[in-house]
Structure formats: structure tokens, C-alpha cells
Amino acid sequence: MQLPSALSFLIDEAIDLSEGDVFLTTLAERLIADGVPLIGAMLTQAAPHPVIERRAWLWRSDTGKVIEALGFGPPMAESGHGEMAVEWLNGLGAGAVRIDQVGSLPDAAQLGWATSRSLDDGELALLADVARFAATPLALLAARSALSGLLTAYLGRRSAGQVLDGRLRRGPGQTITAAVIFADLRGFTELSETGAANEVITALDAWFDRIAGAVHAFGGEVLKFIGDGVLAIFPIGERNAAAACDAALRAVSAACAGMEHLNRTRATQDLPLLSFGAALHLGDMLWGNIGTADRLDFTAIGPAVNLVSRLEGLCRPLGRTVLLSGAFAAETTQPLVPLGEHKLRGIAVPCQVFTLP
């Protein structure tokens, strides 16, 4: 006896998929080929992530496309996301809607189906089998998604991609050219000595939210949190040097605005104001694994990283929040103010330094 197409897919092919949208689209198309009158489908899964609680993929037969929805609250059973999913399926003009939980755990995946008519016993039995046979491939899909999400949260998108691709050993790494930002919170040592622990952590998180959030918003990536400092890059490749530098400068400007707003709030709470210094440079760096044989760090090292960290150290003596190297200034379209050449500690050639008007 030949298996229905949907079950054959779940047994033979679905185990190799790594994307929820591909899984749902293929499964829905196979069910239609088996005679189930689908007009819409839904897949939801828990998402181990610092912000996202659950991911949902929604498929429509009239377009054949999937949209993804992210849940930022508690799991579906606690927040009403399940009811919203049923409402979305009903909104397609369904003759019947069915929701199946895949597995027995409270945060198990769910499959939802909207059909143009009520289903007969054979079709209902097929959907029940689909929920049962989908347990293994969806568990693997969830594990891959969790691994990717956790690595991205701790390493950043680009570094996580390298690790997921199997770059797990020390080696020569990869040379990349990027606009680089090094930013450092001022007075953090004093704040740590005089403030309560929870106030210090809250201040540090608020600072990182402003600077790292701005970096991500403009397409950059945070490589490292170094104490109260941040090392971020805007790689050249998908965009040219001028676009990367402009994006990095806009990110720093956005962080400045965010910190001004934060300080207005802290002033009303009688909390000390927070200031920072940021340096921007354009150059080459070596990007890859360093560390011991069994404890690695995926990071960037090299002349560009050395220079930008030394340049940031000039922010306080020059009385500036933002400093830019000559290499960076040569690529950006923003108006700048020259501050002359300065000798940087450990850097042989003096650096031309610029700042914002």
C-alpha cells in the first residue's frame, strides 16, 4: 500500500530541512496532492531566544507564500497566541479549522489547518497521522533553530554562521575589511564602586541597548562586549566602503541620541548621567578562532582593531564623544571637523583624527 504523499515527505525528506517556512510549504502542498482541500496552514514552535518566545509560519494556498510571525510574550497556551492563530485561519474563509499539537510537552510545536469544507473521516485520520509523523522532523528543526538562535545571541550573526558551518578549530582565520566601532562607557569603574549591583547592571544593559541596538539597526554586528566596551563591525562586501562607513556613523549618531534620551530619564530619577566615547576606523582585520585547543573565541584581531581601540582612548583628552580616523573620514560623505595628527600608543604611524561638527 502506497503511503500518502504527506507522510512520505515526513518520513523521507523533512528530517533534513532547517527552515520552518520550507517545511510548512512542502507539507501543505503534499496534503493538497493527497486530496485535502487546504486553503491555509500554520506551524508554531517555541524559540529559545533572549527576546522571542515563539515563532509562527502562516501559509496561504492562494499565494503559495509563507509569512513569519514572532511572539514576544509567554508560550501560546498562556498568552492567547493559539486563539489568534485560529482567528487567522478562520479569517481565510475556512469551512473548517483544525489545530494539532505535535508531541505532549506544553511548548510542543503546533500544526494548524484551514480547509474549504468539512473533512471526511479519511482526511481527518490523515491529519492525525501527519501530527504524529511530524514529531521527529519538527523536534530536529526546533533543535537546529535553537542552536542557531543561541549561537547568534552569544556570538553574533556572522560568527554564528561560521561556527554552524563547522569552523571549530584554531586556524589562520579570514581577513576581512570593515568599518569598525569601538565604544566605551565613561566612569563605569566609579559607578561600579559606588552604585548598588542591580543599578550597575541596569545602567550597563541600558548602555548596551543603545549602542548595540543602533549597530544592529544599521546593519552592523557586535563582535564583543568587553567589560563596558563594545567592538562592532560593518563589513565591506555586500556594500562598499562608503556605504559601510556611513552606516557605522549613523549608528553612532543614533546611539548618541539614545543616550541623551536615557540621561533625561536618569536625571528625573536622581541617577548619575552616563557618557561614552566612540572611535570609528576603516581597515583590515583577521576574523576567526583563537584560544586554546578546546576553548575558543570567535573574534577579530589585527591592525584595525588595535588602532580603533587606541583612538577611542583619545576621546577624553580631546574632550570629544566621537573620533574618526583619516581612513574612515576619507570614505564617509558626512561633514567632519579635522583635529590634526595624533600619535597613538603602540601605533607606529601618527593618525589623522576627525570629529563630528
Image (cartoon, helix red, strand yellow):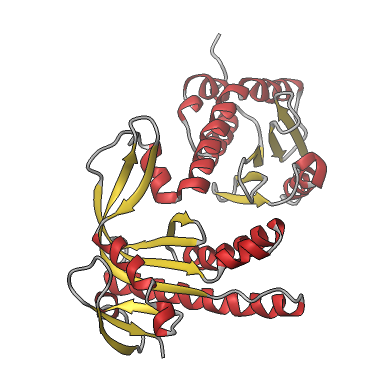
Q: Report how many numbered discs are placed on residues in the image.
A: 0
Residue 320 picture location, percent across and down? 43, 83
Left or right, 339 with reference to 187: left
Q: Which residue is drawn at 74% across and 23% down?
A: 104
Q: Is residue 213 above or below residue 23?
A: below
Based on the displayed image, in which of its 4 quarters is residue 131 positioned?
Answer: top right
Q: In this view, does 103 lie above or below 334?
A: above
Name the foreground residue: 354 vs 212: 354
Q: Residue at x 76, y 34 (%)?
A: 98
Q: Which residue is at the far top?
A: 1
Name the foreground residue: 307 vs 53: 307
Residue 164 picture location, percent across and down? 40, 37
Residue 146 picture location, percent across and down? 56, 37
Residue 122 picture location, percent across and down? 71, 20
Q: Is residue 153 above or below residue 136?
A: below
Left or right, 36 with reference to 95: left
Residue 95 visible in this rendered orientation of the protein:
no
Name the foreground residue: 290 vs 7: 290
Residue 81 visible in this rendered orientation of the protein:
yes
Q: Which residue is at the far left?
A: 349
Q: Which residue is drawn at 71% across and 50% down?
A: 92
Based on the displayed image, in which of its 4 quarters is residue 329 positioned?
Answer: bottom left
If the image is split into quadrants, where does the N terminus sit?
top right
Q: Residue at x 62, y 23 (%)?
A: 135
If the image is split into quadrants, where does the C terminus sit?
bottom left
